[in-house]
């Protein structure tokens, strides 16, 4: 969790950009991300150098012998007049040379440029970014999240950034394998894809292979998972074929590409594309239809499109203009038969009474395997919105026999705009109950976790809201008779009258 001190430092960095004349929030985030990327390239190079000294194993260098002056550790000590031309004319072009030409990342980086024109601003930004704890995995992610929270466009068209702990829950629910093909049709900054990569490294690292490294600046110990149990074929698949993301915000895609590369995905397949449009199928036919084993997504909520802008195949599945329904239909189309998805939806999808809502839910239950409905508390997306949401877990194909329901009442953070850590957290229990689920035993409707049969869901007009099936328990309490309560109130009023009389006497 990002601390108040760290927030203040990011705020100060943000202010420096604004005072330096860069006021577009997306540009500020992009430029900060470029500089963070420059520092992380150097950090990763230094780590590999140290490991090479210990193990003797060579690695692919990011900086050749004649490029050492382009490393963050070297140019950050330069004066303003030297730093600006070096970063603008040499470091930024170097970004493009760190990846193979023709890759998606190279495509995004070809137009990357330093927008900072004032030498003093660049020096301040470099010094401030140098003090950020970028070596701490969770904190690094929280920094991205906090930076993105400063976008003034947050929440427009239902685009809410997903909290990282919710993302990780969804990944843990699906348990992706290193042979899977993973996609996100509205990937934003790549949070779901990055989390899958982190999951794979943690899952496929033997206990004795976990590396603990101490940050020399902070003294904090970071666990590094090397994925020693991953074979060569798995690694090759992960590096270039496993991860695929689409979005229609080019800046976010650039950030997503950098984010994935920093997490070991050398050639992330990230594309500028409206996946609901006809153009998606035309440009990426193999991915638009049965191209994925796993899809994780938090599609835009409450958007509305014109019919002529939507692929006709989706409209045949569900006749609607609502993006939250269209994206579910899209995900079903993108999955291979037997492929699985965990997707966040607004509560309206679960119980909406329109024909399109019912049609979509019927499609999930009758023609696929709806595995779980996990209800999330309404404060999960604060401060962007207080919308109530749920996670749908489903497999393409087959049929639904029973559906696992879980009522998440707390996620470890306060459900107000501050979102501060609290003791209450149901996420670990949710995952535990999911992994030990048993439709024959999980029958207590007063519990947080229980099963509901498909036949009961059908008889309820395919209503998937948790409140429809959960039973509440009431504790009987005894209260004093009204006469006694009235007597107590009279005595209290009498005491108040006496006190007022005493005050009046004191005041003369």
Image: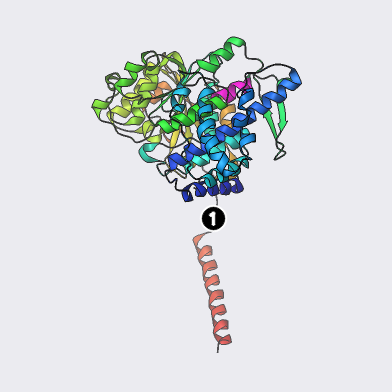
Which quarter of the figure is the N terminus placed in? top right
Q: Is residue 486 above or below residue 304?
A: below
The residue shown at (47%, 18%) is: 101
Q: Which residues are the magenta region?
A: 195-203
Location of residue 372 in the rendering, given as x and y in whole percent from the top left corner: 47, 25
Q: Is residue 472 visible?
A: no
Which of the two residues, 404 or 186, is positioned nearer the viewer here?
186
In the rendered view, does 190 fall on the left or right side of 38? Answer: left
Magenta stretch holds residue 245? no
Q: Is residue 265 visible?
A: yes
The residue shown at (28%, 22%) is: 315
Which of the two residues, 28 or 1, is positioned nearer the viewer here?
28
Location of residue 18 in the rendering, given as x and y in whole percent from the top left corner: 47, 48
| Res 249 → quadrant | top left
| Res 285 → quadrant | top left
Display coloring: rainbow
Residue found at the far top of this picture: 233
Label 1 sits on residue = 479
In the rendered view, does 152 fall on the left or right side of 430? Answer: left
Number of callouts: 1
Q: Is residue 118 above or below residue 461?
A: below
In the rendered view, does 254 fall on the left or right side of 323? Answer: right
Which of the two residues, 128 or 425, is positioned nearer the viewer here?
128
Which quarter of the figure is the C terminus placed in? bottom right
Location of residue 436 in the rendering, given as x and y in whole percent from the top left corner: 59, 23
Circle 1 residues within 10 Å: few <14, some 14–19, many ≥20: few
Location of residue 169 in the rendering, given as x and y in whole percent from the top left corner: 54, 29
Q: Secondary structure at mark 1?
A: loop
Which of the two residues, 373 or 346, is positioned nearer the viewer here?
346
The residue shown at (45%, 45%) is: 22
């Amino acid at each position: 969790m990002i601390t108040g001190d760290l927030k203040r430092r990011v705020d100060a960095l943000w202010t420096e950009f604004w005072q330096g004349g860069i006021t577009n929030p997306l540009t500020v985030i992009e430029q900060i991300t470029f500089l963070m990327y420059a520092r992380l390239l150097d950090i990763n190079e230094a780590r590999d150098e140290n490991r090479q000294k210990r193990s003797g194993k060579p690695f692919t260098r990011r900086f050749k012998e004649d490029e050492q002056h382009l490393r963050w550790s070297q140019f950050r000590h330069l004066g303003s007049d030297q730093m600006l031309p070096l970063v603008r004319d040499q470091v930024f072009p170097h970004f493009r040379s760190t990846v193979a030409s023709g890759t998606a990342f190279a495509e995004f980086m070809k137009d990357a440029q330093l927008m900072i024109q004032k030498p003093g601003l660049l020096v301040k930004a470099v010094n401030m970014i140098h003090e950020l704890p970028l070596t701490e995995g969770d904190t690094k992610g929280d920094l991205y999240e906090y930076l993105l929270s400063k976008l003034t466009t947050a929440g427009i068209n239902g685009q809410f950034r997903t909290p990282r702990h919710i993302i990780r829950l969804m990944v843990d629910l699906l348990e992706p394998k290193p042979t899977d093909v993973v996609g996100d049709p509205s990937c934003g900054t790549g949070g779901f894809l990055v989390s899958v990569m982190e999951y794979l490294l943690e899952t496929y690292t033997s206990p004795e292979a976990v590396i603990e490294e101490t940050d020399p600046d902070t003294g904090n110990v970071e666990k590094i998972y090397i994925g020693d149990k991953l074979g060569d074929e798995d690694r090759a698949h992960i590096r270039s074929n496993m991860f695929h993301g689409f979005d229609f915000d080019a800046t976010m895609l650039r950030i997503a590409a950098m984010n994935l590369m920093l997490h070991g995905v050398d050639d992330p397949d990230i594309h500028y594309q409206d996946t609901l449009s006809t153009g998606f199928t035309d440009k990426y036919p193999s991915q638009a239809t049965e191209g994925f084993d796993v899809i994780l997504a938090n599609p835009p909520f409450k958007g509305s499109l014109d019919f002529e802008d939507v692929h006709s195949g989706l409209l045949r599945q569900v006749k609607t203009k609502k993006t939250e329904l269209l994206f579910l239909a899209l995900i079903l189309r993108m999955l291979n038969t037997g492929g699985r998805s965990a997707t966040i939806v607004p509560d309206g999808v679960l119980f909406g009474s329109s024909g399109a809502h019912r049609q979509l839910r019927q499609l999930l239950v009758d023609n696929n395997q709806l595995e779980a409905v996990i209800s999330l508390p309404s404060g999960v997306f604060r401060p962007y919105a207080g919308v109530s949401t749920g996670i749908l877990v489903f497999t393409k194909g087959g049929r639904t026999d029973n559906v696992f329901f879980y009522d998440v009442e707390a996620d470890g953070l306060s459900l107000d705009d501050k979102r501060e850590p609290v003791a209450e957290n149901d996420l670990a229990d949710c995952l535990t109950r999911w992994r030990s689920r048993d439709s024959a035993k999980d029958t207590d409707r007063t519990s947080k976790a229980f099963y509901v049969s498909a036949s009961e869901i059908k008889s309820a007009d395919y209503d998937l809201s948790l409140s429809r099936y959960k039973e509440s328990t009431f504790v009987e309490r005894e209260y004093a008779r009204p006469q006694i309560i009235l007597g107590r109130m009279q005595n209290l009023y009498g005491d108040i009258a006496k006190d007022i009389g005493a005050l009046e006497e004191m005041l003369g």
